[in-house]
Amino acid sequence: MASMKLVHLFRRHLTIALTLFQSLISCLFNFPILIKIADSFLSLYFLYFCDLRPVTVDLDDGETTVHFWISGHRRISRPNLVMLHGYGGNSKWQFVHQVSDLSKSFNLFIPDLVFFGKSYTKNADRSVEIQARSIVGGLKKLGCDGRGRGRISVYSISYGGFVAYKMAEMWPEMMEKLVIVSSGVGFTQEQKTAEMRKHGGDCCSKMLVPKTPMDLRMLVKISTNTGLMYVDWIPDFILSQFIAVMYEKNRQKLLELAKNLLEREEAELPVISQKTLIVWGDKDKVFPLEHGYRLQRHLQNSRLEIIKETGHAVNVEAPTTLNNLITSFVLSV
């Protein structure tokens, strides 16, 4: 009898243990806990190693909230630098390789663009203009009003370049210098479509807003020259968690932003007055280098820097070189 009780007790405890183990595995695979943890570590890195703090700004329109990471101690001797990200996650994930160095030379303002990260709007507009107005509205609330020490320089990459160019056009008194990295600013609708068709499939859903691990791997390989081969070794469940955290909440709105960008027929690109640094990877497969030359010819007050053996994601493949170019350009008199 005693032995039978021991067997039943063992089976009971084994069943409980297996149930807990199954629940843990299910949590790891189905709930994006790993990416949430990684995102939390990035926040700690921004806070304690880069002296940045999170700030959420409600705009006067009553519809829009913009989330920023800003320098905790803004120094009068340092210029203000706004960093605008592209598609591919929120500002933390895109600028993690750059913020530590840049925070030593600048007062940083790093927003999540609307529908990325923690920024959001109830406005139905999905244009680049709404992004520009939202960022400028947030910056003015934070003291960057275009007067004296309130002027800014902007570093932008890819989609962020479209937003930065619109800011330079609409608020020239606010922006001193502009850095555009790997951005298709000035593309006609036909040029945008032609470039995206080279990669096959639905560019909106697969390149800009990935839905499956295969889509995300394709995005990484197209965006980088090296292809970051380690992405092939990352398990699907981790990539699925990244997609869930970065894209699922606002998937439809992100698709609408991409659709507006790709299908909107642009007027002739205005010539902005700001001194502009254009940076391009010579192996860019998203916006090939010829478009960097075209943008340089369009802007007389600009120069083009080409980074060798680098693809579209210059911020990932060559962050140190890019940081040096940004710092020397913005700090130069």
Image: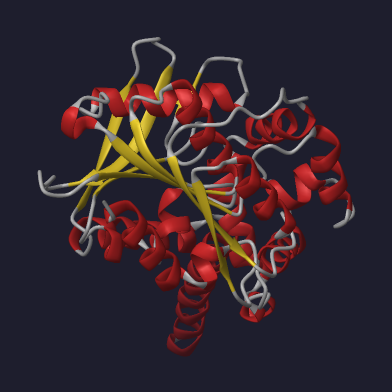
Q: Residue farthest to the top?
A: 61
Residue 22 coordinates in the image, percent (x, y):
56, 68
Q: Nearer the viewer, residue 30 or 319?
A: 319
At 31% across and 29% down in the image, what residue appears? 139
In the rendered picture of this protein, how many numbered marks are placed on residues?
A: 0
At 21% across and 31% down in the image, what residue appears? 150
Q: How is the image coloured?
A: secondary structure
Determine if residue 301 is in view. yes
Q: Quadrant of residue 109?
A: top left
Residue 210 vertical position relative to residue 217 in the rendered view, above or below: above
Residue 311 coordinates in the image, percent (x, y):
65, 68
Residue 196 coordinates in the image, percent (x, y):
82, 49
At 22% across and 58% down in the image, what residue appears? 105
Residue 189 coordinates in the image, percent (x, y):
81, 33
Q: Residue farthest to the front?
A: 300
Q: Residue farthest to the bottom?
A: 3
Q: Quadrant of residue 218?
A: bottom right
- Left or right, 31 with reference to 57: right
Q: Quadrant of residue 126?
A: top right
Determine if residue 210 is in view. no
